[in-house]
Structure formats: C-alpha cells, structure tokens
C-alpha cells in the first residue's frame, strides 16, 4: 500500500491507511473479539476471502494498527490483535463513524 508523498492535512494519511472495503471492519472485529485467528476473522466478516483478509491484515500491521502472535507447535496458530497505542486509538474514531452510520440508518428506515 502506498501513502501519498505530500499532503495538506494529516487526515489524508489516515485516509490512505484505512481506505478500502475491509480495514475498518477488520479493526472493528478485533475490538469486539480481542485476539482472533485468521479463520475466526474470516467467519466473522461476511464476504471476505482469505487472500484479501491476509492482505488487509498485513497492511494494517505495516502501519502499526494490528500485530500478530505466532505460537510454536503444530498445528500452526496465529492470533491477530489491535496494537496498544495506534490500534486502540483508531477505535475511538471508528466508534464515532459507527454512531453516524447508525443515526443515518435510523433516519432512513423511518422514512420508508
């Protein structure tokens, strides 16, 4: 994933980090389920392929929002989690976005 080289506002960088269909949903799932395996995340996120999930998790790791623990032994066990600083901090923004989305849905359901 590429970040823009020049920006007029730090929000542009945050947008670049989070853009795409799945990243905010992945972060939201990790907020509510805590540490999660790849297979659990895939079950919890309707419609995401394993390839796309891995790609998005790697990008989130690259920017310090998510990390993983790889356990020793067989079968292979990997758990993904929000990072203490940046990962948990971005959740505050996602909670506000969730509220705005819910308000919009409530208003539009009443109209129909």
Image (cartoon, helix red, strand yellow):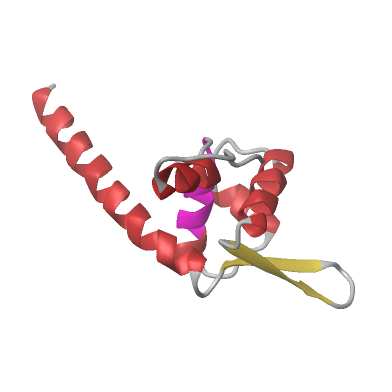
Please give left or right for residue 105 compared with residue 60 in the image.
Answer: left
Q: Which residue is at 63% across, 48% downward?
A: 42
Q: Which residue is at 52% across, 69% downward?
A: 34
> Quadrant where the C terminus lies?
top left
Q: In the figure, residue 47 lies in which quadrant?
A: top right
> Quadrant where the N terminus lies?
top right
Please give left or right for residue 97 compared with residue 25 in the image.
Answer: left
Residue that protrudes farthest toward the bottom in the picture: 72
Residue 15 or residue 91, whichever sits in front: 15
Does 103 sit above or below residue 64? above
Residue that protrudes farthest toward the right in the picture: 74
x, y percent for residue 92: 34, 62
x, y percent for residue 33: 50, 66
Query: Is residue 26 magenta-colored?
Result: yes
Q: Which residue is at 23% across, 44% downward?
A: 100
Residue 68 or residue 59, whichever sits in front: 59
Residue that protrudes farthest toward the left in the picture: 111
Residue 12 or residue 84, whichever sits in front: 12
Please report the bounds of the magenta region as a residue range.
21-29
Please give left or right for residue 95 compared with residue 89 in the image.
Answer: left
Secondary structure, magenta segment, majority class: helix
Residue that protrudes farthest toward the top in the picture: 112
Q: Which residue is at 49% across, 46% downward?
A: 13
Q: In the figure, residue 48 lies in which quadrant?
A: top right
Please give left or right for residue 107 compared with residue 56 in the image.
Answer: left
């Amino acid at each position: 994933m590429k970040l823009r080289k020049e920006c007029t506002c730090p929000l542009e960088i945050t947008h670049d980090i989070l853009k795409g269909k799945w990243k905010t949903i992945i972060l939201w799932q990790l907020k509510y389920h805590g540490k999660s395996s790849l297979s659990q995340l895939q079950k919890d996120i309707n419609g995401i392929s394993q390839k796309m999930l891995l790609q998005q998790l790697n990008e989130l790791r690259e920017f310090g929002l998510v990390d993983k623990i790889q356990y020793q032994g067989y079968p292979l066990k990997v758990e993904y989690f929000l990072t203490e600083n940046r990962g948990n901090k971005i959740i505050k923004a996602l909670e506000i976005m969730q509220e705005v989305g819910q308000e919009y849905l409530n208003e539009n359901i009443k109209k129909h």
